[in-house]
């Protein structure tokens, strides 16, 4: 028995494959351009001393830069924790303190992108947080913990702390994560 292939049967999977490839390239291209725009907005924020949005319709702007030399991390921290902000970088919670001030500065990011490196963090690691005025604050990791999201709340403290929070477990397949991985660092 002879099977004849129609060009339509061959063309359909080819088109679907090209669309999937194009979508993947679009997402990565958009992410690459966004990082360039965030870096430019950060540099302009430093030079002007005021917030500069990375693109006109952005609902966030750079407020700090987090560097962790040991893990080759240099992340622009954005204002707020909206889903759109966290898609492009860590977000600084407005309810926390500002870098270097008494209290707790809280940064949140996705476990599978910007805070993926947190699974490697160890006690004693040093984080550097630079504010929009160019001041640099160093923090030493003191502890890591896994907590229920419902257990997390800020208590005002007289000393300066940095809290990095992400969903846990790191390699979960579900997006519904009720646990948080918390890294606590004290200013030095």
Image (tube, helix red, strand yellow):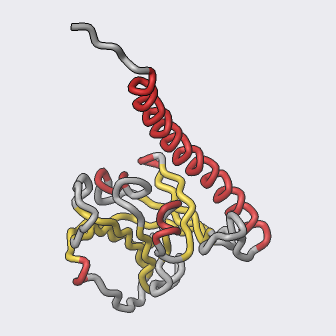
Q: Nearer the viewer, residue 79 or 177?
A: 177
Please tell me whether residue 35 is drawn above or below residue 144 in the rendered image. above
Please tell me whether residue 5 is drawn above or below residue 120 in the rendered image. above
Query: In the visual, does 64 lie left or right of 146?
Result: right
> Which image quadrant: the N terminus?
top left
Query: In the visual, does 33 lie left or right of 104?
Result: right
> Which image quadrant: the C terminus?
bottom left
Residue with the most extreme right position: 48
- Whether residue 107 is visible here, answered yes or no, is yes
Q: Position of residue 5 (x, y in %)?
A: 36, 17
Q: Nearer the viewer, residue 110 or 133?
A: 110
- Give the image quarter of residue 6: top left
Residue visible at 53% across and 45% down in the picture = 28
Query: In the visual, does 185 lie left or right of 80?
Result: left
Q: Position of residue 35 (x, y in %)?
A: 60, 53
Q: Position of residue 113 (x, y in %)?
A: 41, 54
Residue visible at 47% across and 46% down in the picture = 72
- Give the image quarter of residue 37: bottom right
Residue visible at 70% across and 63% down in the picture = 41
């Amino acid at each position: 028995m002879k099977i004849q292939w129609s060009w339509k049967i061959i063309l359909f999977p080819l088109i679907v494959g090209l669309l999937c490839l194009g979508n993947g390239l679009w997402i990565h291209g958009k992410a690459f351009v966004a990082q360039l725009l965030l870096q430019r907005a950060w540099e302009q924020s430093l030079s002007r001393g005021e917030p500069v949005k990375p693109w006109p319709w952005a609902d966030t702007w750079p407020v700090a830069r987090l560097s962790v030399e040991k893990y080759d991390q240099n992340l622009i921290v954005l204002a707020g924790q909206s889903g759109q902000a966290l898609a492009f970088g860590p977000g600084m919670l407005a309810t926390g303190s500002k870098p270097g001030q008494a209290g707790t500065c809280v940064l949140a990011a996705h476990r599978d992108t910007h805070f993926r490196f947190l699974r490697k963090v160890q006690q004693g690691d040093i984080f550097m947080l630079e504010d929009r005025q160019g001041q640099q604050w160093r923090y030493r990791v003191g502890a890591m913990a896994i907590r229920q999201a419902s257990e997390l709340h800020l208590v005002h403290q007289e000393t300066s702390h940095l809290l990095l929070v992400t969903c846990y477990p790191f390699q979960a397949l579900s997006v519904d994560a009720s646990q948080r991985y918390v890294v606590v660092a004290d200013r030095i």
